[in-house]
């Protein structure tokens, strides 16, 4: 006999972002979930979803408290964050407020209202000396963004053991409606389509994650009421250069437009881990998480993008 999910009311923060949109799509059409999407903006970017939307600034504790009182969420999936790694390096106060201060407030609210917190974290908490990493690996962030995400993890861990889950993910790609920032796949496809030459690093290794695989993994954590630390990522450990080549080849672009380079040639404010990557054995074996291969996901992304464009044209 299947047990009905106990947790039904799901509050999503950052619902207009890359992951937030995929989660809204994944959860809102399932009758077992009552979803409230929240984000910065006055309106949702993704239309035609069966869920409520309300603006919520994660820096406004009172605003969050009122939404907790009105909606009484069983689970919060916290996707909102300052995610631009170089901006985090240069705008440290804002980054700390968004990535740590807001999480501390959410933790307090979750404790008061008995709400489970699923918090999104990152491979950037590691130094990239010995990836791919499992859930027990020791963090050592190189960037300010990584430090704030680690501090947030520690804040989340102060909740009772069955009340929190940390989802670590990495190099998330996919499409969405009017996204504020490009991800590696959308950027790369745009460049290739314009016939531009691109230089990608051969010395940074990742397990790139398709956003809809990630949303599926998070839904499983909710459905099976899992707590603790979970790596939810792609399965292929690949350099960013080879990831770019794989995208080009999948879509029939000229892969020679992608040239190899290495991290020393870039002067970016934030240092990136070289060999990160996340091992997903725990999620595969305990919650049946099955990320799909990169070519499959790239084709899926193109199909979804075509649908989103049609919706934008109709608006
Ligand atoms: N993308 C990756 O490669 C990656 C990798 C590892 C971990 N993660 C983690 O996964 C999570 C989701 O990432 P993502 O790629 O979906 O991020 P994203 O596309 O940048 O979305 C973040 C969302 O947070 C919202 N937000 C920012 N400040 C806010 C505020 N004060 N109040 C309410 N909402 C606010 C943004 O709204 P606006 O659009 O209005 O700014 C945006 O919709 C983050 O915690 C990130 O650290 C991401």
Image (cartoon, helix red, strand yellow):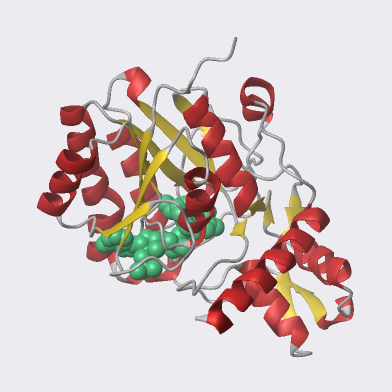
Q: Position of residue 158 (x, y in %)?
A: 26, 27
Q: Quadrant of residue 145?
A: bottom left
Q: Tell me if I can see residue 82 in this picture.
A: no
As rendered, which of 149 and 189 lies closer to the eye?
189
Q: State whether residue 100 is above or below residue 216.
A: below
Q: Residue furthest left?
A: 62
Give the residue drawn at x 62%, y 29%: 283
Q: Where is residue 129 in the image (x, y as percent from the top left)?
A: 61, 45
Q: Position of residue 52 (x, y in %)?
A: 34, 53
Q: Can residue 172 be seen in this view?
A: yes
Residue located 32% across and 43% down the image: 152
- The answer to which of 253 and 215 lies nearer the viewer is 215
Relative side of 94 to 180, left or right: left
Residue appearing at x 22%, y 63% in the figure: 93
Instruction: Please identify the quadrant where the N terminus is shown.
Output: top right
**Residue that appears at 80% across and 48% down:** 293
Q: Position of residue 47 (x, y in %)?
A: 47, 65
Image position of 129 (left or right of 155): right
């Amino acid at each position: 006999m299947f047990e009905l999910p106990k947790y039904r009311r799901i509050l999503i923060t950052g619902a207009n972002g890359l992951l937030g949109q995929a989660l809204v799509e994944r959860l809102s059409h399932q009758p077992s979930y009552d979803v409230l999407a929240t984000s910065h903006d006055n309106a949702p970017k993704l239309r035609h979803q069966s869920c409520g939307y309300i603006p919520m600034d994660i820096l406004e504790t009172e605003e969050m408290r009122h939404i907790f009182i009105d909606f009484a969420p069983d689970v919060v999936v916290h996707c909102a964050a300052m995610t631009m790694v170089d901006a985090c390096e240069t705008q440290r106060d804002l980054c700390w407020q968004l990535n740590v201060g807001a999480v501390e407030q959410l933790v307090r609210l979750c404790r008061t209202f008995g709400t489970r917190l699923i918090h999104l974290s990152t491979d950037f908490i590691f130094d990239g000396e010995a990836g791919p990493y499992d859930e027990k690996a020791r963090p050592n962030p190189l960037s300010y963004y990584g430090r704030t995400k680690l501090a947030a993890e520690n804040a989340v861990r102060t909740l009772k053991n069955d009340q929190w889950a940390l989802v670590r993910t990495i190099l998330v790609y996919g499409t969405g409606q009017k996204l504020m920032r490009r991800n590696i796949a959308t950027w790369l496809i745009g460049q290739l389509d314009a016939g531009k030459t691109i230089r990608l690093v051969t010395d940074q290794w990742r397990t790139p994650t398709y956003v809809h695989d990630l949303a599926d993994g998070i839904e499983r954590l909710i459905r099976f009421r899992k707590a603790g630390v979970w790596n939810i990522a792609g399965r292929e450990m690949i350099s960013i250069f080879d990831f770019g080549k794989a995208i080009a080849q999948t879509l029939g672009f000229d892969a020679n437009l992608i040239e190899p380079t290495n991290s020393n040639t870039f002067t970016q404010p934030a240092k990136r881990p070289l060999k990160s990557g996340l091992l997903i054995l725990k999620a595969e074996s305990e919650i049946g998480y099955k990320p799909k291969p990169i070519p499959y996901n790239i084709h899926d992304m193109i199909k979804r993008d075509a649908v989103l464009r049609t919706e934008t044209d109709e608006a």
